Image (cartoon, rainbow, N blue to C red):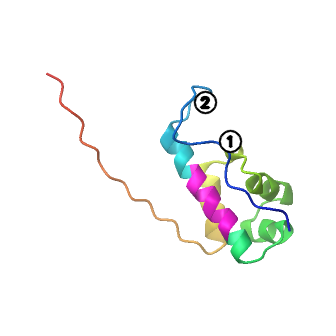
């Protein structure tokens, strides 16, 4: 089985090279990390993970290599759902200072 690595990009740093917000990157990073952990914990090969996630083996390879930019939040949630993982979203409002 191929080695699973965490996503390489630091989602807390926005270098301006992508129109995505650091929050989008952080969410994708967390979802990718969960998917990679499932693969390792369940002792799946990339081929087995691909069947269960409903994607191709090269797609799982990209996941394992931490290629964050190749995955959408929706796609990652769908993959996790196919593996029997329930994804919940917790939204909290951050109060901003009023302008006068």
**Distance of label 1 from label 2 (alpha carbons):** 9 Å
Q: Quadrant of residue 20?
A: top right
Q: Position of residue 39 (x, y in %)?
A: 73, 70
Task: Please name the residue that numbered disc 2 is placed on.
Answer: 18
Dot 1, crowdedness within 10 Å: few (<14), some or many (≥20)?
Answer: some
Q: Position of residue 77 (x, y in %)?
A: 59, 60
- Furthest residue to the left? 100
Q: Quadrant of residue 40?
A: bottom right
Q: Is residue 42 above or below residue 26?
A: below
Which residue is drawn at the image coordinates 61% and 64% (left, top)? Answer: 34
Q: Position of residue 25 (x, y in %)?
A: 56, 44
- Looking at the image, residue 26 sits to the left or right of residue 57; the answer is left
Q: Is the residue under label 2 in contact with that under label 1 (CB below 8 Å)?
A: yes
Q: Is residue 89 above or below residue 73?
A: below
**Does the magenta-highlighted stretch encompass residue 77?**
no
Q: Position of residue 21 (x, y in %)?
A: 51, 36
**Does the magenta-highlighted stretch encompass residue 32?**
yes
Which residue is drawn at the image coordinates 66% and 72% (left, top)? Answer: 83
Secondary structure beneath disc 2?
A: loop
Secondary structure beneath disc 1?
A: helix
Which residue is drawn at the image coordinates 61% and 68% (left, top)? Answer: 81
Q: Which mark is residue 46?
A: none
Position of the C terminus, as image quadrant, is: top left
Task: Please name the residue that numbered disc 1 is placed on.
Answer: 69
Which residue is drawn at the image coordinates 69% and 63% (left, top)? Answer: 36
Dot 2, crowdedness within 10 Å: few (<14), some or many (≥20)?
Answer: few
State whether the magenta stretch is mostly helix, strand or loop: helix
Q: Which residues are magenta?
A: 28-37
Who comes first in sequence, dot 1 or dot 2? 2
């Amino acid at each position: 089985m191929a080695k699973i690595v965490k996503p390489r990009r630091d989602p807390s740093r926005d270098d301006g090279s992508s129109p995505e917000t650091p929050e989008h990157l952080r969410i994708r990073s967390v979802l990718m990390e969960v998917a990679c952990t499932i693969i390792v914990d369940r002792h799946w090969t990339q081929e087995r993970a691909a069947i269960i996630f409903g994607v191709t083996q090269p797609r799982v390879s990209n996941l394992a290599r931490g290629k964050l930019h190749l995955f959408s939040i929706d796609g990652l949630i769908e993959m996790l759902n196919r593996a029997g993982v329930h994804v919940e979203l917790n939204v909290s409002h951050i109060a901003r200072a009023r302008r006068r």
